[in-house]
Image: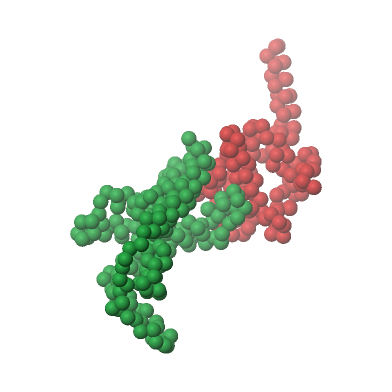
Amino acid sequence: MNSYKLLTIMVAALWVFAASPLGAQPDNIVFDPLKTFGKSKRSGVTLHHNRHVEAGLSCKDCHHIYENGKNVLDESTLEEGNQGIRCSTCHGPKFRIGLKQAFHDQCIGCHTKFQKERKKTGPRYCGQCHVKK
Amino acid sequence: MLNFVQGHLISIAFIVFILGLVYQGIQFFKLTKKKEWCVPPSSIEIKREKMTTQQRILEGLRSLNGNLWKTDPALTFITVVFHICLIATPLFLLGHNILLDQSWGVRLFSFPESLSDLLTLIVLICGVYFLGRRLFLARVRAISSVYDYIVLLIALAPFLTGFLAYHQWFDYEIVILLHILSGQLMLITIPFTKLGHMLFFFLYRFLIGSEYSFVRGSRTW
């Protein structure tokens, strides 16, 4: 009887977890420059989203909408399929920071910062992200 | 260790490179400060009469006859190509410029990556030609020592590892680390080995050279 109870609780917990925003996040996001830019010099980049969450980063460490130097993003808008939260909504050819530079700044910038602080960090050199197939 | 190579060692290499060149430049002028009595070569009097542009060009071309262009045109051509590619490739490489932009917010114009790839290959082919000369030409082998081979290797290593890194052959993590290390080694060794001709070429060619051509008899250095 006890084991049934435990199983029921576990299954219920799994459902709750799956329905929570944390569970709904994609593990890996592939940025394909061919799709975005039409042409590509380098291969696409796989962003390991779960590794960033596991590393203890908060959503707003990366996702942002800046107003007067403050990140005013509402975290509840961060849902898969919401076109308004895509990087390309703001970072495009018409904006100060283009999409490619935004990606480079965001990834390499943060990884370098962590390296300088002697923390565990991610890749910083071209071929570590743009992996040739 | 890894952090050191990718961080502070880059700054150290650049500081050694720049201060080393400044030191060598100062040494050059210091060691040659003492005046030596000399007779300017007045026997070769060049007539500086009015020449047409065509005559000037012809005379310029004729003056090439006395130098390496006449004795070894292939080497002259290859060495010019080698040096142009050697300097242009790393400066106008997309990857370098993106990293530079990340660090300092400045960047140079970048070649397309396929062009950089080709230029790197040209540097390597020229390097193999130089190595071949040292190995197989008796008159060159006679004056080659281990030092010459090491210097050639130091100059080529960043290009070989860069080429491998771009194509992501072998283990990328190791290759890119070797690429950074070999670049730093080259920067550090430039002022203190015969790679110093990066600076001395200009001193020899234009400062000492000018004494015998532009303003004969007066020392400009």
- Which is nearer the eye, A38 or B215? B215
Q: Residue furthest top?
A: A1
Residue A9, relative to residue A67: is it above or below? above
Who is closer to the viewer here, A77 or B70?
Answer: B70
- The reply to whether residue B89 is in sight is yes
How far across and how far down the image is residue B94, in percent?
54, 56
Q: Quadrant of residue B82?
A: bottom left
Compared with A3, B170 (above or below) is below
Q: Is residue B191 above or below residue A24?
A: below
Q: What is the image's colouring?
A: by chain
* Left or right for B170, reference A69: left
Q: Hey, which quadrant is residue B67 in on the image?
A: bottom left
Q: Residue at x 70, y 39 (%)?
A: A61
Chain letter, colour red = A
Locate residue B105 relative to residue B200 in the image: left or right: right
Rendered location of residue B130, percent (x, y): 31, 59
Residue at the location (72% across, 38% down)? A59
- On the question of residue B159 being in view, the answer is no
Quarter of the picture holding the C terminus of chain B? bottom left
Q: Residue at x 63, y 32 (%)?
A: A55
Give the drawing colour for chain B.
green
Question: Which residue corresponds to the image point at 71% horizontal and 35% vertical from the top-left?
Answer: A58
Q: Position of residue A119 (x, y in %)?
A: 59, 33
Q: Is residue B14 above or below residue B85?
A: above
Residue A33: % across, % down? 60, 54
**In-front residue for pair A46/B140:** B140
Judged left or right of residue B121, residue A51 is right
